[in-house]
Image: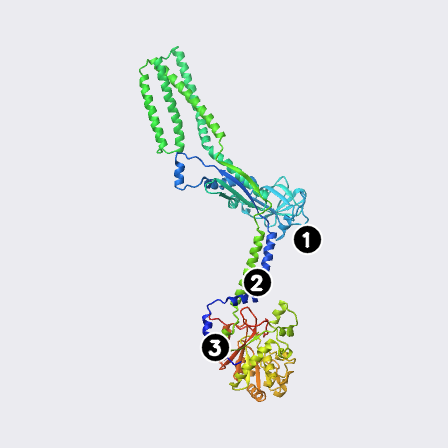
Amino acid sequence: MNSPTQADTTNRAAPRQQQDDEIDLLALFATLWHQKLIIVVCTAIFMVLGVSYALLATPVYRANAIVQVEEKSPGLPGMSDVTEMFGGESAAVTEIELLKSRKVIGTAVDDLHLDILVEPKYFPVIGRAVARRFAGEDDEVNTPLLGLKSYAWGGEEIEVSELYVPASLFNKVHSLVAGENGSFVLFSPDGDEILSGQQGTTASAQGYSIYVNTLAARAGTEFLISKQRRLSAIIALQESLGASERGKDSGIIALSLEDTKPSHAEDILNVVAKTYLRQNVERQSAEAAKSLDFLKEQLPTIKKDLEEAERKFNAYQVKAGSVNISAEAEALLEQVVDIESGMAELQLKKAELDRLYTKDHPAYQAWREQMAEQRARKQEFSERIKGLPETQQELLGLKRDLEVGTEIYTQMLNNIQELDIVRAGTVGNVRIVDDAAVNVEEPVKPKKALIAVIATLLGGFLGVALVLVRAALNRGIENPDDIEAIGLPVYASIPLSDEQRKLDFGSRKSARHLRKLRNQHPTALLAHRNPTDITIEALRSLRTSLHFAMLEASNNIMMISGPSPNVGKSFVSGNLAAVIAQAGQRVLLIDMDLRKGYMHKMFDMGPEDGVSDVLSKRVSIDKAIKPTKINELFILPRGAIPPNPSELLMSKSLTELLETVSGQYDLIIVDTPPIMAVTDAAIVGRQCGVTMIVARFGLNPIKELEVTKQRFEQNGITVKGVVLNAVERRASGYGYGYGYGYGYGYYHYEYKSDK
């Protein structure tokens, strides 16, 4: 296999750049499949949470009632057609607003004491579910779990019809603790005892007053109780009460109310509907009631005037003796009485008009015309009466007053009776079609199946999002073309081997062990233990490529480094040296990582008497170099960890060491620390003929390789190429198939992206 040329790299980079803006669906699927465990775990967790919530959540029931609003007939003929023409609102729309008014809702709040909130104190999360599933006999209370007697576990019941608290403690949660035989103790929000009382009696103290109707609980059971402001309770009920018209202009109003207690929802809805019906009837009879009150106020005055007229008439007859009214006077009297009665009726009508309309209203103008006509007629008859004898005139006037008073009084009594009948018989235009009812078999909330499905889908979505976010934040190289696009040839792609994991960590495959193995140094040489492994075959291909690269090198020393820890460069260095030695060349492997070198572990030897000892003149080169189990392969371990590794590598001793061994071996492979962690690689690289860097599949971003290349070039070192290590088999088609790595414990190097 020939090494890639710069021309090849340029040719590959052009089409690669054209694809940067395209979405590689295959690669996307490969990323998701590779991280499928995260998606499955996240989905399972959310599914369990969703199912748990569906099972533990308190069911909510819906009460329904139906009210019919009959359309009122228009006040004027043809007005209904005009209303429809201009799109007038349905009568039900107005009735819905009246139904949800504070006057109607406030009655329900007062009758059912909805401004008093009281419930047992349940154990967190599971307490309500346990209490809800308790099915005991009447007045039977569930046995407390784990001895937690202060919590309610099922069967508890309390009803409070009266509660007064200081104004500053509205909406504050108080504690009521049940005692023996219906007794209780009330505590303030701060936990101070306020008062003690007994079921069925009013207890008062410190500005508090409470009346407990019903209390069935085990001694020591705690209840949470609070007093709301009346307006707050009304607003809360208005918001929870649903009212809508079924069908356009149908006049059918559907009422609904949701509550955790079915009977409570029914009671509230029934009270609201009945209160609304009663007030609708009262509105319909309001006009008749007002007119009736007015007539009753005027009746005593009319009666008094009638009695006075009768007294005067009788007195005149006694004084003047028996006087008969002539036929002409009798006819005039009848007509005058009619006029006077009409004027009196108009006067009563004027009082009602004054209450309903202004003086510019057409009805008021019509009344004025009628009154003027009656007055004109009265004036005409008054002139005719003046032609009668004086005795006849006097008698006629008294007789007129008496008959007019009698007529007005009788008419008023008749009107009062008619209005009383109208008021009592008013039905209204609203009726309750269906009383409130609740289907206790099917709660409206929670929708268990829907919640479980949504939670599962949400978990899967979040799992996918987490994988994609992690992939976006860690844009590790997965395609060799990305490396070649920045001008670095890829000499080989080394697949990961499951055999190496077995050698280093046994047969354990748990996630915990796999995570630990990512930072575990290899302890066995794969090329020696399993020379037929696919990873070793890839290293043999690399060996061929490096053979031609070394022909152009200034010496036979090759340095292998990397951008950061955990890329597996020591694994590549050790096994590459082994396969080259197996080909018959004399190879020396030098562990130049004086800080954390572990190459000696791969060859079952200690680090002592190594590079640091040679450079410090404590050990000779011949004594430091040790043979291995592989023929023609020798190793120079790191030696004792020195206090000044960089200064030691910058000494002349390093040059002397490399020049000495260069003539004794066919190839020298130097393993150095990561360039982005320490500067050792830059120091050693100046004296090496070939520099190769190892990048890890899915770990090193392309920007990191660019920075690595720049670091070496700044120090006058040309990077010959890249070995892509730990390649995994994925759906995108790159690589083979295992997934762990090795590495160092250096501090993490941070760099800034150009993005």
**Mark nearer the viewer, 3 or 1:** 3
Left or right, residue 619 beside residue 679 = right
Q: Residue at x 63, y 51 (%)?
A: 127
Of badges 3 and 2, nearer the viewer stands: 3
The answer to which of marks 3 and 2 sits earlier in the sequence is: 3
For the residue marked with disc 3, what is the amino acid?
Thr
Q: Which of marks 3 and 1 is nearer the N terminus?
A: 3
Which residue lies under the disc numbered 2?
39
Taking the spot 35% from the left edge, 32% from the top edge, the residue there is 362
Which tag, 1 or 2, sits closer to the chain's start?
2
- Give the residue at mark 1: 146
Q: Residue 471 in the image: x percent, y percent?
A: 53, 67
Q: Mark 3 points at which residue?
A: 9
Considering depth in this image, is 433 or 188 the residue closer to the camera? 433
Q: What element carries label 2?
A: helix
User: Outermost residue toward the top?
Assistant: 321
Q: Residue 15 carries which label?
A: none
- Up-down relation of residue 530 to residue 66 (above or below): below
Q: Is mark 3 on a helix, strand or loop?
A: helix
